[in-house]
Amino acid sequence: MTIIETPSDWPADEAAARRIQDELRDRVVRDEPGPAPGTGLVTGVDVAYDDDRDLVAAAAVVLDAGTLDVVAEATAVGRVAFPYVPGLLAFRELPAVLAALAALPAGPGLVVCDGYGRAHPRRFGLASHLGVLTGLPVLGVAKNPFTFTHGPLGEHRGAAAPLLAGDGEEVGRALRTREGVKPVYVSAGHRVTLDNACAHTLRLTPRYRLPETTRRADALCRAALREATAAR
DNA sequence: GCGACAG
DNA sequence: ATCTTGTCGC
């Protein structure tokens, strides 16, 4: 198996990483609604780590947006490119994610990633960063509210409440995907609207709290990491 | 200065 | 993210 390399222009420290986020932030496209839910392709991306062995594995799983059937998969394994720092997650995950996407036989369509897009200290989370680098429509679905807050929301599937930043801006939405279950936290990445991102998220959660895209990608990158670990 | 903090 | 058994429930 091939171990991908960290890009030569990757930031060496946190200050450099923040500088890059400040530079790229204005390239995010926020006025495109994005693909219609249920049509075309939807691709989930996720990453698993083995910090002891300095390994990271990423997976991209392409689903038919209408049937949610898997139509393509790809993985990539690499060295950990950056430590986990809240607000700088993209620098840890992107090299492997980009490699997995590049290994797909065809275009991914809309991309769904773990974590945030606009809901970010500098309004440039993983989903935004991935979108700007690839030009693809991307949205983020996170499992935790990070530093953001939201009011109460109904118990029924589809109930939502604005996810608010400290300055009161709605940077995302807490969205209940399963009746009576903790909500997920949706935010727009690139070339998708928050409303459309939520509509996609609901279509991707007919049965579980998390989108089928991330569930499939999570299982695949863990398997890829196991194989990479076993191969050494 | 200290704590909180996507994965 | 990751370390981890059994267990309650559809």
Image (tube, coloured by chain):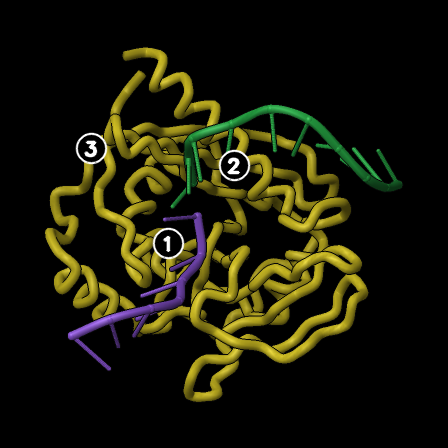
Chain colours: A yellow, B purple, C green
The residue that label 1 is drawn on is A130
- Give the mark nearest the N terminus, 3 or 2: 3
Q: Is residue A83 left or right of residue A93?
A: left
Q: Residue at x 11, y 51 (%)?
A: A12
Secondary structure beneath dot 2 equals helix
Distance between mark 2 and mark 1 Cα atoms: 18 Å
Say which label, 3 or 1, has the lower sequence index.
3
x and y percent of residue A96 in the render?
32, 38
The residue that disc 2 covers is: A218
Look at mark 3 in the image and give the residue it sits on: A5
- Return the residue nearer the eye: A18 or A83: A83
A85 versus A24 height, above or below = above
Q: Chain of mark 2?
A: A
Q: Residues within 10 Å of mark 3 (few under 14, many from 20)?
A: some
Judging depth in this view, the residue of A69 and A164 nearest the camera is A164
- CB of mark 2 within 8 Å of CB of mark 1? no
Neighbor class of circle 2 (other Cα within 10 Å; few <14, some 14-19, many 20+) is many
SS for dot 3: loop
In x, y percent, where is residue A36? 66, 59
Real-space CA distance between mark 3 and mark 1, rounded to the nearest whole angstrom? 18 Å
Task: Specify the quadrant of the image occupied by residue A226.
Answer: top left
Residue found at x 40% / y 17%: A227
Q: Is residue A14 above or below residue A153?
A: above
Chain at tag 3: A
Q: Residue at x 28, y 42 (%)?
A: A95
